[in-house]
Image: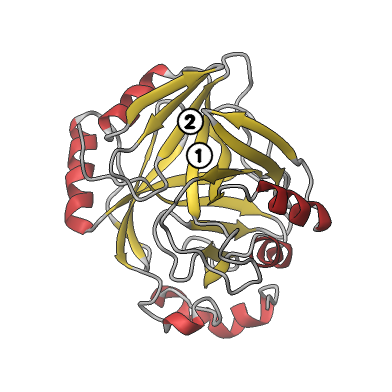
Amino acid sequence: MLNQIKGLHHVTSMAGSAVQNNSFFTDTLGLRRVKKTVNFDAPDVYHLYYGDEVGTPGSVMTYFPFPHIARGRPGTGEVGTTVFSVPQDTLSYWSDRLCKAGVEGLKADEAFGEKRLHFAGPDGDGFALVEVKDDPRAAWTGNGVGADAAIRGFHSASLRLRDEGATGELLSFMGYDKVDEKDGVIRFGMPGGNGADFIDVETMPNISNARLGAGSVHHIAFAVENRAKQLEVRKALMDTGYQVTPVIDRDYFWAIYFRTPGGVLFEIATNEPGFDRDEDTAHLGEALKLPTQHEHLRKALEENLEPIA
């Protein structure tokens, strides 16, 4: 069993409008945009990152906004709901705030003894807030949500699968413990994690496969401290039979990817070097930052990418 993984690192999804996406995460949810860059493989498309003040691993939601992309179709083989941690007794505040902002899909419930508020993102994305007592992570308060209510980072993510078995075995191999099971959902937890510690597995054998599009999660990333730990994880996964990519430099972290038995794309990402490698912390996310190989495209990209504040 692995011991290098310390919870979630980031979740990357697809979107339509970059302006709408940016407004939702900064104005409505109160997160900080910590990086404005482009997709490594499609530089005419933004890659936007939102999180806490410095983009701490376990807090970062990222997006590829394709202006004319079709809406995704929910189903199995994907991340279903991405869940953020908020302080205890703040869901009424968030319900009022999201309602006033015209956010759709508001629904309160409780699972595993935790109060939750579900809501939809601009492209139908599945989100929830969950009340967590004494989450020690520092909140970003620069976008108008006070420290007494602001999002602390991720709490969990759910995987929608046709069959739990092989993916459950994989999560156990990655260091997760099976901590609870209720109403057909199995909760896996990361002992000693970074706060973004839970994966909920929903088994839906009669549901068709998801179709990737706006509102879909493209991949989910797990955090390791550094490149040495990442290489240990890569070797262990390959020794177990997984097809894992070479290490890829993503400027703000190094990444490896592999497809899970249930169809979900997993990434293992390093905590280093961080989002302040090319911007001062006070100005994260303000300038358009380009990968070195795309710097020669700057003029054309700045003219053609949808302007965002």
Please tell me whether residue 277 is drawn above or below residue 261 in the rendered image: below
Name which residue type carries label 1.
Answer: Ala
Q: Are marks 2 and 1 in contact (CB under 8 Å)?
A: yes
Residue name at image x 37 percent, y 20 percent: 166
Whether 125 is drawn above or below 138: the answer is above
The answer to whether residue 269 is above or below residue 169 is below
Crowdedness of circle 1 by 10 Å Cα count: few (<14), some, many (20+)?
A: many
* SS at badge 2: strand
- Where residue 57 sits, quadrant-wise, is bottom left
Which residue in the structure is indicated by mark 2?
Answer: 200
Q: Position of residue 26 (x, y in %)?
A: 64, 67
Please give left or right for residue 52 compared with residue 106 in the image.
left
Residue found at x 57% / y 58%? 63
Q: Nearer the viewer, residue 253 or 120?
A: 120
In the displayed orientation, state which residue is furthest to the top.
206
> At label 2, which amino acid type do we have?
Asp
Q: Residue at 64% of width from left, 66% of height from top?
A: 145
Decide if residue 210 is in sight here: yes
Numbered mark located on residue 72 in the image:
none
120 on left or right of 137: right
| Residue under numbered circle 1 | 157
Viewer-closest of 68 and 201: 201
Depth check, front residue: 203 or 281: 281
Lower position in the chain sequence, tag 2 or tag 1: 1
Is any atom of residue 167 visible in this view? no
Give me the C-alpha separation between circle 2 and circle 1: 6 Å
The quadrant of the image that shows the N terminus is top left
Q: Position of residue 38 (x, y in %)?
A: 53, 68
Q: Which quarter of the rendering shows the C terminus?
A: bottom right
Q: Position of residue 189 (x, y in %)?
A: 37, 34
How many neighbours does mark 2 have within 10 angstroms: few (below 14), some (14-19), or many (20 or more)?
many
Q: Residue at x 60, y 78 (%)?
A: 301
